[in-house]
Amino acid sequence: MFTKAAALVVLATQVFAAPIELEQRQSCPKIHIFGARETTASPGYGSTATFVNEIISAYPACGGQSSCGGDSYAQSVQAGVKAVTSQVSAFAAKCPSTELVYIGHSQGSQIGDDALCGGGDTGDGITSTAATIAQYNFKAIIWTGDPRFVPGETFHVGSATHGGFAARPAPITCGKYESLIQSYCDATDPYCSNGNNPATHNGYQQEYGAAALKFVKTKL
């Protein structure tokens, strides 16, 4: 987790694990995890991270699997966009001057892309073209393996030259946020591009983690 006194990191999964209590929320995720680290531990969950991550793994963003109730991928994307919109809106209303950082991987990137850039995501049942969180105080956005990836965008990092399976339709762009985004996608990724190596899709944190941290630090 990237941290700063005035920064909020919103983790883009269907289970939001950030230890932040939002007042007067219109809707809440099913599970909210509070992790308290031990003395001398660096910012984050400390030694409790193992337990927190195991719980999160048991309740993943859904793609039809029984562990999350059998919701389809499209249903999960729709729910994710609503959750992102609800939670970001609630926090921004409470703390409008707080600098916001959004970090998402795979479906987590897709729902953030839908909410921040808009344009509709008809393949997953979202017909509204509204950018539902574009008015807020975002300072940095990190996406890895984004199914909405479009080649040639100024914020793309990686070797991909083909769009993802839910590529954002032209002429929709991410507008004023383009200089604040880094979207990592390599050619062999089968989800943000048209490759055939799932390991690429799951390897961005190791490949680009240091670069992403450096980028975020320049924006905060």
Image (cartoon, rainbow, N blue to C red):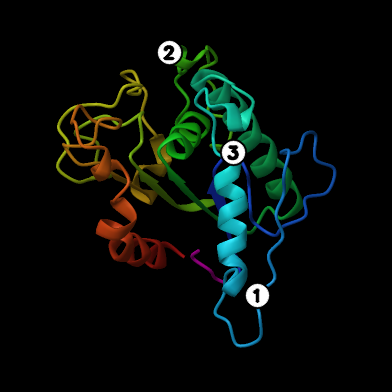
| Nearer to the camera, 42 or 215 | 42
Distance of mark 1 from mark 3, alpha carbons? 23 Å
> Circle 2 is placed at which residue position?
123
Task: Indicate the amino acid at tag 3.
Answer: Gln
Task: Indicate the amino acid at tag 2.
Answer: Gly
- Tell me whether circle 2 and circle 1 mark residues in contact (CB < 8 Å): no
178 sits to left or right of 117? left
Query: Quick check: is 19 in the magenta stretch?
Result: no
> Circle 1 is placed at which residue position?
37
Question: Mark on residue 14?
Answer: 3
In the rendered image of this protein, does residue 43 appear above or below residue 142? below
Q: Would residue 130 be seen by someone viewing this image from the given angle?
A: yes
39 sits to left or right of 12? right
Foreground: disc 3 or disc 2: 3
Distance of mark 2 from mark 1, alpha carbons? 41 Å
Read off the magenta span.
Answer: 1-5
**Residue situated furthest front in the rendering:** 66
Q: Earlier in the sequence, mark 3 or mark 2?
A: 3
| Nearer to the camera, 116 or 14 | 14
Identify the residue at image location x=27%, y=29%. Answer: 150
- Tell me whether circle 1 and circle 3 mark residues in contact (CB < 8 Å): no
Query: Quick check: is 4 in the magenta stretch?
Result: yes
List x then y, in percent, for residue 71: 59, 21
Task: Indicate the amino acid at tag 1.
Answer: Arg
Say which element carries label 1.
loop
Say which element carries label 3.
loop
